[in-house]
Amino acid sequence: MSASRSQPLELFVGGRWVPARGGGAVEVRNPATGRCAGSAALASAADIDEAVAAARASFDAGVWAGADPAERARVLRTAADLLEKRAPELAASITAELGCPIWFSERAHVPNPIRHLRYYADLAESFPYDERRTDGVNASVVTQEPVGVVAAITPWNGPLSTPALKVAPALAAGCSVVLKPPPETPLTVRALAEALAAAGLPEGVLSVVPGDRDAGERLVAHPQVDKISFTGSSAAGKKIMAVAAGRIARVTLELGGKSAAIICDDADLDAVVPALLPMALLVNGQACIAQTRVLVPRRRRDEIVAALAEALRAQRLGDPADPSTTIGPLISEGQRDRVTGYIATGRAEGARVVVGGEHADLPGELARGWFVPPTLLDGVDNGMRVAQEEIFGPVLAVIEYEGDDEAVAIANDSRYGLSGSVWTPDEERALAIARRIRTGMVSINGRAQAFGTPFGGYKESGVGREMGPEGFRSYLETKSIAVAP
């Protein structure tokens, strides 16, 4: 097990580490053992106000917004280099506070933030900020400017990657940022602030203020915040959108998901199952893009259920710091109880638990961890709660269909529309099905999206897009200036 991290109870406000002003502190528990993984200060309303004031002052003064894009790129690249040097330490820290397997921290949770910083550094330099347009008589310069002060509110399931996904494009665009990580995973993100400060980011441009719901509400409602970028639940996203509407603040919302994996009648299960399970069990099932509704052709249902059950039984549940572990604990006792509660609900609704379903029986200190074994529910109707509501745990629901049209109808019968997948060796058929799914991202046969692809969803899965040029443009405002022809 990773040792606990002891950190000063300070907040990064306006580019300086300062004592928290009455927000208290949180002791972060390692989800695998319940032991202390570290502690962090939490922001009070006064801390939030100070952070926004610093961001507003720095933006209005132009210390960063007015900097040459090449200088912004230099800072981001330098910060990426500094984080890369700390990669093993950061991976261990993420696994200790989140509970995801160490191999996933090493392969995704640490490299991706570094890649985001470098990608947006490149884009900051190459982006066409000005475009001259003419109608033959009149001429205009259409220019792109930073949107202003950004409130970035991030969830616990991406302790470093989600903050970087928001901070990197916002800083590349010239914005000033107040980042509010959650109290569940406030430890590793400290490294992002340290790296950017050491790279030469001017004071005032970035604050990192972990906080609870009250701190988030204070930040969202603050009249000096021009844009809110939020990742979290759809319920919270609705409240944020309503508050933002009061002053027409810009929003990007990346919210929940209940993604469908459509296994076609000609699919090769030997290829499908090992590729599908990592997409379904991502971050121990605690990912908005997890493929948790498995849609299967009626005539192959028994065969597919048997193959999935065998593969789930073979998963190794245990210490996330052990490289051989494939499934770690859930983030908290409350989340564990929420997930097992959904499994009980599924049973009550008529679903059959094929694999899993009970609290894990693990040895030693792992017995105190918040584990739920990977669970397969068969006989699920798409109208059941376990098919419609985001469980956020390692629970897969098998739903029958008859023909491609019904599969698409079931996939679209959801208030969410974030991700999905189609599994068939017939590429033309797969693409045709993918085009009909009302969701922001679809994978064919488990292929990963190209880096730089926009990330976001339809319906209650959000508003706007992150990643790629789309994620950069969301931090810019468009201005037209009439000029001499």
Image (cartoon, rainbow, N blue to C red):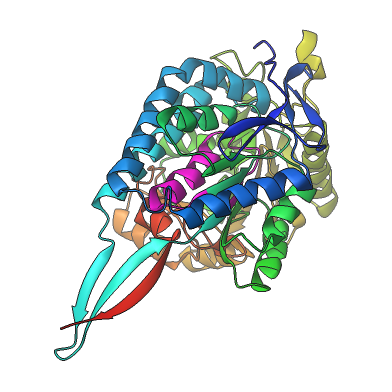
Q: Is residue 170 magenta?
A: yes
Q: Quadrant of the C terminus?
A: bottom left
Q: Quadrant of residue 42?
A: top right
Query: Percent x, y for residue 273?
Result: 49, 36
Q: Quadrant of the N terminus?
A: top right
Q: Nearer the viewer, residue 310 or 136?
A: 136
- The span shown in magenta is 151-176
Query: Percent x, y for residue 227?
Result: 56, 60
Query: Percent x, y for residue 268?
Result: 41, 41
Q: Nearer the viewer, residue 199 or 334?
A: 199
Residue located 59% across and 47% down the image: 54
Residue located 51% across and 26% down the image: 104
Task: Identify whether 273 is placed above or below 2.
Answer: below
Residue located 81% across and 42% down the image: 338
Q: Quadrant of residue 220?
A: bottom right
Task: Identify whether 421 is placed above or below 188.
Answer: below
